Image (cartoon, rainbow, N blue to C red):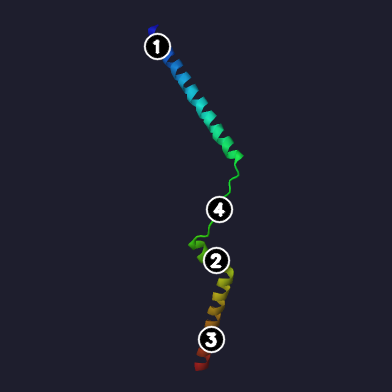
Amino acid sequence: MRIFLLLSLIILTIFFICKRVFYSAKRNLFKDQAEWFSKDIKIKYSKSKEISKSDKHDNYLKIIAEESKFYLEEQSNQDKESNQLN
């Protein structure tokens, strides 16, 4: 009987402590959430060095097309030279 009373007291104590902890956590969470909802958050983006370097090569397809054009011109020039030598 004493064990039952002792266990019930411990369980009730833990229950009330947890209830208070959860209540205060919930209250603080909603308080912080209300503060965030009332503010207009503006994010300022600054250009970093990596972004400014990549501005030169924005159009990758154009770069690939130019490189392939130069490669094909070199190949055709080599073919013409080899045909002229023969």
| Residue drawn at the location 44% of the way across and 17% of the way down | 13
The circle on residue 55 is: 2
Residue type beneath disc 2: Asp
Task: In the rendered view, tell whether residue 57 sits above or below residue 25.
Answer: below
Q: What residue occupies the far top of the structure in this picture?
A: 1
Q: Whole-Å distance between the Cαs marked 3 and 4?
A: 52 Å
Q: Whole-Å distance between the Cαs marked 2 and 1?
A: 73 Å
The circle on residue 77 is: 3
Residue assigned mark 4: 44
Residue 55 image-quadrant placement:
bottom right
| Residue drawn at the location 55% of the way across and 32% of the way down | 31
Mark 3 or 4, which is nearer the eye?
4
- Dividing the image into 4 quarters, which one contains the N terminus? top left
Front in this rendered view, residue 33 or 17: 33
Residue type beneath disc 1: Leu
Q: Earlier in the sequence, mark 4 or mark 2?
A: 4
Q: Whole-Å distance between the Cαs marked 4 and 2?
A: 19 Å
Task: In the rendered view, tell whether residue 13 sits above or below residue 43.
Answer: above
Q: Earlier in the sequence, mark 4 or mark 1?
A: 1
- Asked if the residue under mark 3 is in contact with the one under mark 1, i.e. CB atoms within 8 Å, the reply is no
Q: Whole-Å distance between the Cαs marked 3 and 2?
A: 33 Å
Residue assigned mark 1: 6
Quick one: SS at disc 4?
A: loop
Residue 73 image-quadrant placement:
bottom right
Q: What residue occupies the far left of the structure in this picture?
A: 2
Quick one: SS at disc 1?
A: helix
**x, y percentage for residue 5?**
41, 9
Mark 3 or 2, which is nearer the eye?
2
Residue type beneath disc 3: Asn
Task: In the rendered view, tell whether residue 81 sits above or below residue 7.
Answer: below
Q: Earlier in the sequence, mark 2 or mark 1?
A: 1
